[in-house]
């Protein structure tokens, strides 16, 4: 509870709870005198204090303690139970019914406190004793206590049911031997108790609330009651948009177009029906697939041209490939408001024009070639074709007349440059030329050793 450091000791808190459970409200009140109970932040302790003040007819302190406890624990039905009972004793019936609704909202199926509260509210409204008897009997069957057992015996006595009254008194004294109600029940059974002193007595008429006296408490209570009211009676949902059930086909079509319309990041908003959207998605997939295939075909052209020495065709094919991508991007970025079929037709026509242009370039005669290339078998791999080409060139060189050493050096340098220009200056060409030179030098070393 954490109260000792805040001005109220644990011993006082524990003792007050024990005395309240034993219904020794006078002794509990003596302990609370001079104590600042609101230094405690325990709602159940404040509830006990409110019950002690209520049983000693100190309604102001009781109301303040119970209201603050309810603010701390809005779902605590035991606190709300005491608030209903307090307001019934004060004659504030309207406020008691308001808390009764909150109690019913929070109550579970096993909670029988609502029936006892209903009995007290009905009794404050001065309903007939027969109706009160039915409510109280049903409540006592579910949860019996000495307090309510004595109230049931008084109700039997007021209705003239002496046998029922005596049976109830005997049952009470047998069930709660140490209860303070046992002496009252024995006195009632003997006919010595004045039944006008009912256990639950309320004002005849509803009292006018003292706003000035309870101003500070009302300010706190009303704020909490507003929150409770929202939980018990939540506001109706607000309708933000209404649609006519008798809408025409044109209205329905326009609504569908409005829902299906979407905005591209590079164009204006377009609206189309479901079939058109699906057709466009399929066409875009076919278009992307066609572009990938065209790209693959164009990638093979530079590779073959590289082996054959067609470096100019390589640059042409690469430029055409870039042109395909640029045209495809331009088509996607245009604001397309035409029909989907016309859009696909225009794209396919552009692709056909590009293919025709590439084919026309490929059919042109080779501008740069060497006669030795025609002696190389085309079925060989690129590496084998290059080796065979180098051997043919070397044989042709050896068959020519012997020149001076300076001319041979220049010829070897020219040969390296020739091979580089012929097959391309790349790592594979350089490696094969180097390999060829190493093999040639190794073949020449043994002859030098023999000399």
Image (cartoon, grey):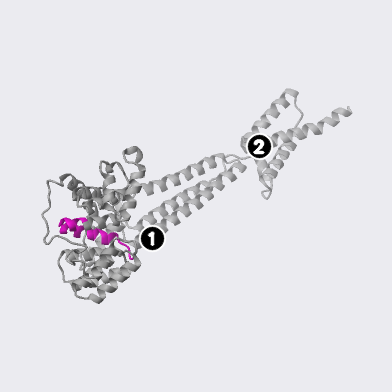
Instruction: Say whether disc 2 or disc 1 marks the residue closer to the N-terminus.
Output: 1
Circle 1 sits in a helix, a strand or a loop, which is it? Answer: helix
- Magenta portion: prevailing SS class: helix
Q: Nearer the viewer, mark 2 or mark 1?
A: 1
Q: Circle 1 is placed at which residue position?
A: 279
Q: Nearer the viewer, residue 238 or 252?
A: 238
Does residue 259 show up magenta in the picture?
no
Q: Quadrant of residue 274?
A: bottom left
- The answer to whether the residues at label 2 and label 1 have Cβ atoms under 8 Å apart is no
- Look at the image and tell me whether residue 301 can be seen: yes
State the separation of the CA atoms marked 2 and 1. 50 Å
Does residue 103 show up magenta in the picture?
yes
In percent of width and height, residue 89 lies at 18, 57
Q: Is residue 238 above or below residue 2?
A: below
Q: Which mark is residue 429?
A: 2
In percent of width and height, residue 366 lies at 57, 43
> Quarter of the image containing the N terminus?
top left
Q: Which mark is residue 376?
A: none
Please name the residue shown 16% across and 66% down the image.
196
Circle 2 sits in a helix, a strand or a loop, which is it? Answer: helix
In percent of width and height, residue 138 lies at 28, 71
Q: Quadrant of residue 393?
A: top right
> Quarter of the image containing the C terminus?
top right
Please name the residue shown 26% across and 59% down the image.
103
Mark 2 surroundings: few (<14), some (14-19) or many (≥20) residues within 10 A? some
Instruction: Using residue 15 as the reference point, say whether residue 217 is left or right of it.
Output: left
Magenta range is 86-109
Residue furthest toward the top?
Answer: 406
In percent of width and height, residue 66 lies at 25, 50
Q: Is residue 229 above or below residue 399?
A: below
Q: Nearer the viewer, residue 170 or 18?
A: 170
């Amino acid at each position: 509870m954490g109260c000792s450091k805040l001005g109220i000791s644990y011993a006082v808190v524990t003792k007050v709870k024990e005395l309240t459970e034993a219904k020794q409200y006078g002794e509990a009140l003596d302990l609370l005198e001079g104590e600042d109970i609101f230094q405690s932040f325990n709602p159940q302790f404040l509830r006990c204090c409110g019950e002690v003040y209520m049983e000693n007819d100190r309604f102001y302190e009781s109301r303040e303690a119970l209201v603050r406890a309810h603010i701390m624990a809005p779902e605590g039905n035991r606190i709300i139970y005491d608030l209903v009972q307090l307001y019934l004793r004060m004659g504030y019936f309207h406020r008691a019914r308001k808390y009764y609704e909150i109690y019913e909202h929070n109550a579970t199926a096993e909670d029988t406190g609502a029936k006892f509260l209903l009995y007290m509210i009905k009794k404050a409204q001065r309903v007939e004793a027969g109706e009160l008897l039915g409510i109280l009997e049903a409540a006592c069957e579910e949860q019996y206590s000495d307090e309510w057992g004595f109230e049931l015996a008084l109700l039997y006595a007021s209705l003239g049911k002496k046998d029922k009254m005596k049976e109830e008194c005997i049952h009470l004294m047998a069930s709660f031997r140490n209860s303070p109600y046992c002496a009252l029940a024995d006195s009632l059974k003997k006919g010595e108790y004045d039944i006008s002193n009912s256990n639950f007595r309320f004002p005849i008429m509803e009292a006018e609330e003292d706003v000035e006296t309870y101003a500070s408490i009302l300010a706190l209570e009303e704020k909490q009651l507003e929150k409770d009211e929202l939980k018990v009676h939540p506001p109706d949902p607000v309708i933000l948009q209404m649609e006519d059930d008798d809408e025409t086909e044109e209205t329905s079509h326009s609504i569908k177009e409005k829902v299906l319309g979407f905005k591209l990041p590079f164009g204006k908003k377009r609206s189309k029906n479901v079939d058109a959207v699906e057709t466009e998605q399929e066409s875009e997939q076919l278009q992307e697939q066609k572009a990938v295939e065209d790209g693959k075909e164009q990638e093979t052209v530079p590779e073959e041209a590289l082996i054959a020495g067609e470096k100019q065709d390589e640059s042409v094919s690469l430029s055409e490939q870039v042109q395909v991508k640029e045209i495809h991007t331009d088509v996607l970025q245009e604001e397309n408001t035409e029909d989907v079929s016309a859009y696909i037709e225009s794209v396919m026509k552009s692709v056909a024009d590009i293919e025709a242009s590439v084919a026309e370039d490929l059919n042109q005669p080779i501008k740069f070639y060497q006669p030795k290339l025609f002696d190389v078998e085309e079925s060989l791999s690129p590496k084998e074709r290059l080796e065979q080409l180098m051997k043919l060139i070397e044989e042709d060189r050896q068959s020519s007349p012997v020149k001076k050493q300076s001319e041979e050096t220049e010829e070897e340098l020219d040969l390296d440059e020739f091979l580089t220009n012929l097959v391309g200056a790349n790592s594979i060409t350089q490696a094969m030329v180097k390999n060829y030179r190493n093999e040639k030098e190794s073949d020449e070393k043994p002859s030098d050793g023999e000399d």
